[in-house]
Amino acid sequence: MGRSRLRRPPAPADAERARSVAARGGTASLVGTGSAAVAPLVHQVRADGSAVLLFADDEPVLADIRRAAGGFTAMLELADRAPVDLREPVRALLWVTGRLWLPEPVVARRFALQVADVHPSPELLRLGHGATLVRLDPDFAVLSDAEGGAVLAPVDLAAARPDPFCRGEGPLLAHMEQCHPEALDALARLMPAALRERHDARVRPLGLDRCGLRLRVETPLRDHDVRLAWEEPPATVPELWAQLRRMIDSSVPEGPAPRLSSS
């Protein structure tokens, strides 16, 4: 099933989008290990693309890392999924290639505590009791999403910041789809005419960031991603709500616009 790309307003820079994918966490798998992809019990990707991964002690990749001199090269794949149940749910992929190594137990426990401060998980309690912590030192990262693709160095990632709304967009977009279909109908009027005039299209919320709102238009044969720009880039959640209401208002030439509550 194909997906066409339409001309879009400006979007966040490549490194910022990559940092946002990493901050959301997504679904992780380790690939390029000579065997099937393996999902870590816990994962955290840091600002520069380095990662902390927790694996069950019986995962074969741990033996490969122990045998490798100077580190074992592999690739961590992060799949960024949309916050609503789309036909094609993965909206971005981030691949981080680097060297895997096993920290000493004291260092591993420190890494685990740092992960727990940000993403608490009961699986971390298995460290040293059926699970082993692995560190990935990045060589480079590759981003692929609807805006395009990019190869990024660790220094590029470390210099960027994630989008200010990247962790909180999910509940807002899910609320929009579940409780405010009339708002999506209004926003559909802002899409290009070729999509706006289709009667077999379903408009879904795909994502949002400081630059605008993204919609997914599902049609029988393919999907289309559309970016709508805010009038002014928001910096806070109240400003984001104000920009969203303003966008909805602008879609209705006459009469009252549908109201989108934050509750």
Image: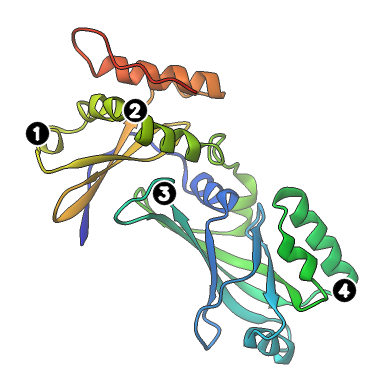
Which residue position holds label 3?
82
Left or right of residue 145: residue 187 = left
Residue 181 image offset from top left, x and y in percent: 29, 30
Mark 3 residue element:
loop
Viewer-side label of 4, 2: 2
- Counting residues from the start of the chain, the first of labels 1 and 4 encountered is 4
Mark 2 residue element:
loop
Which residue position holds label 1?
197
Which residue position holds label 4?
105
Q: CA distance from mark 4 to mark 3?
A: 36 Å
- Counting residues from the start of the chain, the first of labels 2 and 1 encountered is 2
Residue 150 image offset from top left, x and y in percent: 44, 57
Residue placed farthest to the front in the image?
179
Amino acid at dot 4: Pro
Which residue position holds label 2?
180
Q: CA distance from mark 1 to mark 4?
A: 61 Å
Residues tagged 1 and 3 counted as in contact (Cβ below 8 A): no
Q: CA distance from mark 4 to mark 2?
A: 51 Å
Residue placed farthest to the bottom in the image?
67
Amino acid at dot 2: His
Amino acid at dot 1: Glu
Residues tagged 4 and 2 counted as in contact (Cβ below 8 A): no
Residue 226 image offset from top left, x and y in percent: 27, 39
Left or right of residue 215: residue 92 = right
- Counting residues from the start of the chain, the first of labels 4 and 2 encountered is 4
Query: Could you say which quadrant of the image residue 246 lies in?
Result: top left
- Counting residues from the start of the chain, the first of labels 4 and 3 encountered is 3
Which disc, if any, is residue 150?
Answer: none
Q: CA distance from mark 3 to mark 2?
A: 18 Å
Q: Name the residue at 72% across, 65% down.
A: 123
